Amino acid sequence: MPLIELKCVKCGKVFEELVKADGVYPPCRECGGKTEQVYSGELFVNHAHKGECSGDCSCCGGCNK
């Protein structure tokens, strides 16, 4: 279960909660209102090389040949 940051759409309270990965979020701890996930970080994606590995892992963080 991931720890995610949630924000209440009714009162604005922000808190962290352990939730299942099913997209169902618990109600606000303060007012019982609907909550939504807060996206506060960055996402990094490792794109695989097409063809043979060049051995330059500085661009992909891959195999460290």
Image (cartoon, grey):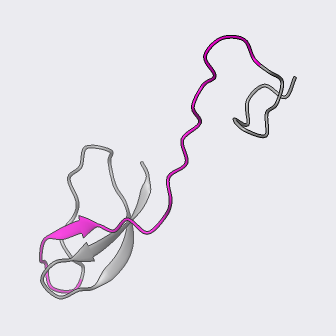
Name the spot of residue 53 as percent of width and height, x first: 75, 17
> In this view, which residue lies farthest toward the top?
51
Tell me where the magenta segment starts and ends, as one range. 30-53
Residue at 15% x, 85% y is 31
What's the residue at 42%, 48% (across, down)?
Answer: 1
Residue 13 left/right relative to 41: left
Give the residue at x 65% y 11%: 51
State left or right for residue 47 relative to residue 56.
left
At x 13% / y 78%, what residue is drawn? Answer: 32
Q: Quadrant of the C terminus?
A: top right
Residue 61: where, in percent of width, then height?
73, 37
Q: Does 43 sit above or below residue 59? A: below
Q: Position of residue 29 (x, y in %)?
A: 24, 79
Quarter occupied by residue 27: bottom left
Picture quadrant of residue 13: bottom left
Viewer-side residue, 54 vs 46 = 54
On the image, which quarter does residue 47 sit in?
top right
Towards the viewer: 29 or 41 = 41
Main secondary structure type of the part rendered in magenta:
loop
